[in-house]
């Protein structure tokens, strides 16, 4: 409860800036039998980032939300690293020095965070972490238009963790899940189990690539090869986590892609369907599978658990 200021709406609002638009999604998870998408819209820019954000702040009362945004994949790096042999509370700061030689810029110029990867043998002690590194100047550039528009950001997240939030509701208990989501630039493949992110990678196939039907067969071959390689690698790294199936976001010709992958992979493949895990009575356009693909990471980011006080 906010006793001395405006009461904030429950849940998170994710705002992502693009060259021509701003995407917004508000999702309520806590207190719901299934997560509910309360808002998911794209707004065409009118003016620059700040002008557009100021307009949306006024029209949508954005100061009544817990706000967040996501980094673009080009703006950060994700490294698997050995967990430092230090107390858990000190692990994140210790990771900074374990990745300094992996960066092509000074570690002092980086903002670094990390999360524990569950132990491959199922024990309580994690031996690996995923470190996220981004240049301070890129973080500052990401935050600046929101600050200039008087929108307070509580969190900056990454697409891999947004996918993890979605995958949690697709997993079978005690089994792993591979989730492949296509976006405007590429595809993100995540491996999760028990609501935890174990591994991820980017595959250089974008949503727009499927618009060329003449290239579809080659794309299917490439995706099948990349998926099988990734599944084999994950199996070698995490033998205690049995991946039950692969879920892929919709693309043009998606059913043919799923049929091809089911014939060429060792695991069953399903197309993603938001209606199986979430409610969105006020956002009927999300019944369109391609719109679900466009918004999957946006919605997943807004499914973040816990809310910071402000």
Image (cartoon, rainbow, N blue to C red):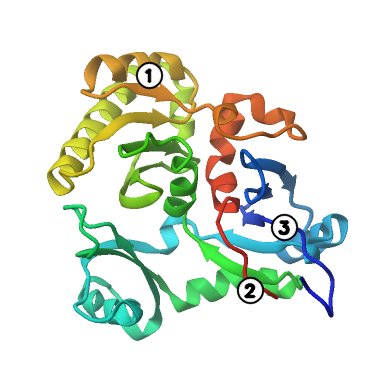
As drawn, is 162 to the left or to the right of 195?
right
Residue 75: image quadrant is bottom left
Q: Establish if 60 lies above or below 208.
A: below
Q: Which of marks 1 and 3 is in front?
A: 3
As drawn, is 5 to the left or to the right of 36?
right
Q: Residue furthest right?
A: 59
Distance CA(mark 2)–CA(mark 1): 41 Å
Q: Residue furthest bottom?
A: 108
Q: Quadrant of the C terminus?
A: bottom right
Which residue is drawn at the image coordinates 81% and 62% (left, top)? 57
Instruction: From the image, tell me which residue sits under label 1.
Output: 257
Instruction: From the image, tell me which residue sits under label 3.
Output: 10
Distance CA(mark 2)–CA(mark 3): 25 Å
Circle 1: element type: helix
Circle 3: element type: loop
Neighbour class for label 2 at 10 Å: few (<14), some, many (≥20)?
Answer: some
Q: Considering only order in the chain, which callout, 1 or 2, is on the residue closer to the N terminus?
A: 2
Distance CA(mark 1)–CA(mark 3): 38 Å
Instruction: From the image, tell me which residue sits under label 2.
Output: 144
State how many labels appear: 3
Report if the CB atoms under discs 1 and 3 are less than 8 Å apart.
no
Which residue is drawn at the image coordinates 87% and 56% (left, top)? 59
Q: Considering only order in the chain, which callout, 3 or 1, is on the residue closer to the N terminus?
A: 3
Q: Considering only order in the chain, which callout, 3 or 2, is on the residue closer to the N terminus?
A: 3
As rendered, which of 195 and 149 lies closer to the eye?
Answer: 195
Neighbour class for label 3 at 10 Å: few (<14), some, many (≥20)?
Answer: some
């Amino acid at each position: 409860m906010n006793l001395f200021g405006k009461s904030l709406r429950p849940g998170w609002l994710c705002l992502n800036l693009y060259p021509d638009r701003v995407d917004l999604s508000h999702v309520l998870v806590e207190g719901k039998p299934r997560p509910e998408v309360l808002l998911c819209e794209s707004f065409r820019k009118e003016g620059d980032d700040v002008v557009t954000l100021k307009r949306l702040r006024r029209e949508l009362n954005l100061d009544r939300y817990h706000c967040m945004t996501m980094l673009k994949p080009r703006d950060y790096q994700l490294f698997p690293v050995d967990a430092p042999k230090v107390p858990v509370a000190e692990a994140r700061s210790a990771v900074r020095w374990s990745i300094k030689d992996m960066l092509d810029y000074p570690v002092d110029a980086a903002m670094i965070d990390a999360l524990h990867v569950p132990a491959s043998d199922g024990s309580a002690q994690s031996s690996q972490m995923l470190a996220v590194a981004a240049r301070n100047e890129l973080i500052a550039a990401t935050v600046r238009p929101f600050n200039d528009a008087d929108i307070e950001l509580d969190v900056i997240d990454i697409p891999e963790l947004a996918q993890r939030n979605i995958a949690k509701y697709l997993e079978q208990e005690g089994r792993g899940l591979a989730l492949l989501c296509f976006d405007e630039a590429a595809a993100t493949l995540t491996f999760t189990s028990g609501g935890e992110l174990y591994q991820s990678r980017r595959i250089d196939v974008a949503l727009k690539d499927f618009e060329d039907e003449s290239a579809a067969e080659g794309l299917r071959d490439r995706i099948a090869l990349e998926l099988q390689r990734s599944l084999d690698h994950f199996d070698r790294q995490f033998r205690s986590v049995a991946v039950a199936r692969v879920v892929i976001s919709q693309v043009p010709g998606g059913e043919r892609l799923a049929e091809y992958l089911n014939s060429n992979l060792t695991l069953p493949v399903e197309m993603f369907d938001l209606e199986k895990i979430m409610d969105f009575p006020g956002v009927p356009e999300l019944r369109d599978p391609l719109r679900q693909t466009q918004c999957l990471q946006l919605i997943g980011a807004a499914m973040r658990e816990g809310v910071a006080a402000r």
